[in-house]
Amino acid sequence: DSGVTQTPKHLITATGQRVTLRCSPRSGDLSVYWYQQSLDQGLQFLIQYYNGEERAKGNILERFSAQQFPDLHSELNLSSLELGDSALYFCASSPSVGTGEKLFFGSGTQLSVL
Amino acid sequence: GESVGLHLPTLSVQEGDNSIINCAYSNSASDYFIWYKQESGKGPQFIIDIRSNMDKRQGQRVTVLLNKTVKHLSLQIAATQPGDSAVYFCAENGSSNTGKLIFGQGTTLQVKP
């Protein structure tokens, strides 16, 4: 158990809908990262938050947004969903923002867009 | 753009043999490298990491080798066990200072009993 909690584990929805994925980092970790894993793209970095502030952005679509709350949990919002958004979404956390730290991953949310 | 690539998509080994999984990275500015193991239905799990000031690092049954000259990383697993069957990812920190990791595509390790 990595200590990173993601909910829900599975999410099935329809195209055009909006969903929210939730992540609670390890106790004491200030950085939260979101990754998308699809069969043909591997693990793709989406966005990082550090202590409530956006720290880095990857190839995140404009339809996607995230935030980190004062209690350090994070939410990833996916809107106007398309079939191609079906993927595993992972949250990871690390103690700080310094480069050269291992990331601890949650067990992921499997999103299926029908 | 930045990329980390794996040489082989699938590696099949006999139980008890040693396994070697290779990885090429493209960003010369990367100074931190890490291997993760991902079992079916689970998130990536840390195996071992190495910084660029080292060439080799050993863990329990695993060794990571770093060759900065040719930008190559390898993971060696000694006495491979059925429980080692999983997808293995290498990752690098790239040129950013944010902490994010850039992942390769992954190699599937199959252990035959």
Image (cartoon, rainbow, N blue to C red):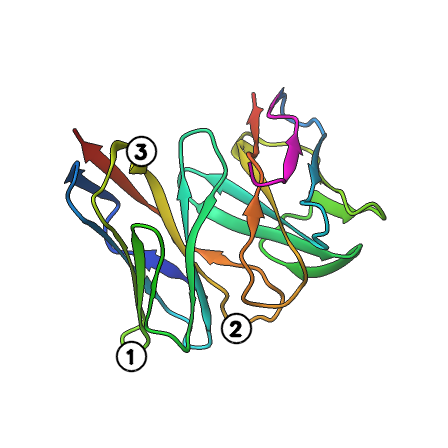
Stretch in magenta? A1-11
Q: Give residue B83's mark.
A: 3
Measured Cα–Cα span from mark 3 to mark 2: 34 Å
Q: Residues within 10 Å of mark 1 (few under 14, many from 20)?
A: few
Q: Is mark 2 on a helix, strand or loop?
A: loop
Q: Quadrant of the N terminus of chain A?
A: top right
Horizontal placement of A1 versus A57: left or right?
left
Instruction: Residue A35: give x, y in percent of width and height.
Output: 56, 46
Callout 1 amino acid: Thr
Residue at figure coordinates x 20%, y 44% from the top left = B79
Horizontal placement of A10 versus B11: left or right?
right
Q: Give residue B69's mark.
A: 1
For disc 3, the chain is: B
Residue at figure coordinates x 58%, y 54% from the top left = A59
For disc 1, the chain is: B
Measured Cα–Cα span from mark 2 to mark 1: 17 Å
Q: Which label's residue is closer to the chain start, 3 or 1?
A: 1
Callout 2 amino acid: Ser
Callout 3 amino acid: Gly
Q: Give residue A87's mark.
A: none
Q: Quadrant of the C terminus of chain A?
A: top right
Residue B62 appears anywhere in the view: yes
